[in-house]
Image (cartoon, grey):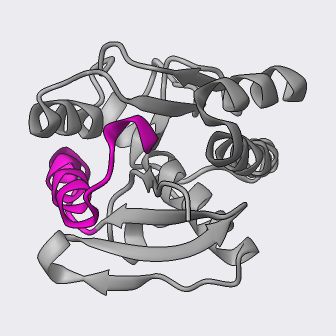
Amino acid sequence: MESSFLIVGLGNVGAKYQKTRHNVGFLVVDQIAKGQAKAFHSKRELKADFADFILEGKKVVLVKPSTYMNLSGEAVRKTIDYYKLDKSNLLIIVDDVDLPLGQLRLRSGGSSGGHNGLKSIEAQLSSKDYYRLKIGVGKDINIPLADYVLGNFTEDETEKLNVAIKKAVEIVEAFVAGGYQGALNKLSQLR
C-alpha cells in the first residue's frame, strides 16, 4: 500500500458546537466518513476521534481533535507521531472568516490568520509548512468574532455551506489521489 494521508477537520467537541461556524472542519470529515460508511472511534491517548479507510490504494486517516480548538495541535502532533506520517500528506480543514461564506481556498503554508486552531498546530509542528483547506464562513462586523464563529449557521447559510462541504469532500479525495497539485486542479474545476 502507498503512503497514508492524514485529514484533520478542526472544530470544538460537544453538541452545543456541532453546527457552529467554527466546526466546518468537523462537518467536512463527518461527510467524508459518511460517504465511506465509516464511523469515528475515540483514541483518548491521541486526544482525537478517528475514522480510517482505503481510497485508491492509499490509507486515509480522518481526525477530529477531541481537545478544544486552541489545543488542536496536540492531537495533530500525537497522531503524526503515532502513525509515523509524513507532514507532506497532512491536510487541515478549517473555517475562515476572511472568506465569503462557501468559498474554498487551498494553501500549502502561510500564516494562521489569527485562527487559534492553526496557531496551535504551528506551535506543535514548529512549522507553518502544511496544507490547509479553508472554508469561508464570512463575518458580521456587528457581532464579536468569538460569538460569530461559535454561532450556528442560519437556514440560508446552511444551503451554501452544504454545497461547500460537497466540494471540500471532492478536493480531499483529489488530494489523496494526486497530492496538492491534484487538489488544486480539482478546486479550479469546481469554481
**15 up-or-down from 22: above or below:** below
Q: Is residue 185 visible to the viewer in this orientation of the structure?
A: yes
Q: Residue at x 17, y 51 (%)?
A: 77
Give x and y (percent) for residue 53: 58, 75
Q: Residue at x 53, y 50 (%)?
A: 24
Q: Specify the farthest residue to the top.
A: 110
Quadrant of image for the C terminus: top right
Check residue 171 for magenta coloring. Answer: no
Q: Quadrant of residue 49?
A: bottom left
**62 up-or-down from 170: above or below:** below
Say whether residue 179 is left or right of residue 74. right
* Viewer-nearest residue: 45 or 144: 45
Q: Quadrant of residue 190?
A: top right
Give x and y (percent) for residue 125: 16, 36
Q: Residue at x 39, y 51 (%)?
A: 10
Q: Main secondary structure of the magenta part?
A: helix
Give x and y (percent) for residue 8: 42, 53
Say whether residue 121 is left or right of residue 41. left
**92 up-or-down from 11: above or below:** above
Q: Residue at x 53, y 54 (%)?
A: 152
**123 up-or-down from 5: above or below:** above
Check residue 80 for magenta coloring. Answer: yes
* Viewer-nearest residue: 99 or 83: 83
Please report the bounds of the magenta region as a residue range. Answer: 66-89
Give x and y (percent) for residue 123: 10, 32
Say whether residue 12 is left or right of residue 57. left
Task: Tell how many labels.
Answer: 0
